[in-house]
Image (cartoon, helix red, strand yellow):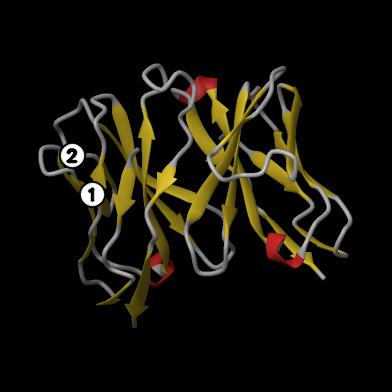
Amino acid sequence: AQTVTQSQPEMSVQEAETVTLSCTYDTSESDYYLFWYKQPPSRQMILVIRQEAYKQQNATENRFSVNFQKAAKSFSLKISDSQLGDAAMYFCAYRIGLYSGGGADGLTFGKGTHLIIQP
Amino acid sequence: GAVVSQHPSWVICKSGTSVKIECRSLDFQATTMFWYRQFPKQSLMLMATSNEGSKATYEQGVEKDKFLINHASLTLSTLTVTSAHPEDSSFYICSARDPRRSYEQYFGPGTRLTVT
């Protein structure tokens, strides 16, 4: 079974600085996706960024980028120019490929990292 | 964008009663929806996969008879917590798979259930 590990329960960063959140995962599959989700106090899950395992290029979305190390099964999230609105819980998640999983592609989440932004 | 709603957003029920939570995809048809459970300050745990017109697939350890899932249409899945007990109090979140967007999953806003 796949597992997702986030070893940083809490991280703190100064506004405008850069912070990196760590995530490792374990799977025997070759077709899968990795995600970072943000959960603010409203508890609405917001997709931050996603990475297809077959793509070597690291995904980027504005101030958010990932460092995807497939061999090491590592998937870290870098937030540049941190803003107060970035404060939230961040969850790393794994999903098997739709066709590889036969439709059983529910997400497996890590325990989350609470990100604090210091003004 | 893809919008998923849940109703109610918050519900209190007495121990022993049943409560139904609805998950709707508002602007797309979802053949597959997922139900997750989140305890306070914890992560989301997949409970079951809901497929339109067929029986739900439950994750190991999830009681099928306690958490009844029905996906009767392409835009609606329901989760019924039967004979609720205080330990069922939790935050329940659904997601729906959007076939228009590479089958990406979109989350509802969640339902907070409190059993007294």
- Quadrant where the N terminus of chain A sits is top left
Res A99 quadrant in image: top left
Residue placed under numbered mark 1 in the picture: A65
Mark 1 is on which residue type?
A: Ser
Which SS class for mark 2?
Answer: loop
x, y percentage for residue A4? 32, 49
Residue at the location (81% across, 48% down)?
A: B82
Q: Is residue A70 left or right of residue B101?
A: left
> Badges 2 and 1: C-beta atoms under 8 Å apart?
yes
Q: Is residue A54 left or right of residue B77?
A: left
Mark 2 is on which residue type?
A: Asn
Instruction: Reply above or below: B28 against A9.
Output: above
First in sequence: mark 2 vs mark 1: 2
x, y percentage for residue B93? 62, 49
Along the viewing direction, whichever of B57 and A98 lies nearer the viewer: B57
Which SS class for mark 1?
Answer: strand
Which numbered circle lies on residue A28? none
Q: In this view, does B21 lie to the left or right of A32?
A: right
Instruction: Reply above or below: A6 against B18.
Output: below
Along the viewing direction, whichever of B39 and B63 lies nearer the viewer: B63
Residue occupying the far bottom of the picture: A119
Residue placed under numbered mark 2 in the picture: A58
Cα distance in 3D space between marks 2 and 1? 7 Å
- Residue A72 visible? The answer is yes
Identify the chain of the residue marked 2, using the numbered disc in the image. A
How crowded is the residue under tag 2: few (<14 C-alpha within 10 Å), some, or many (20+)? some
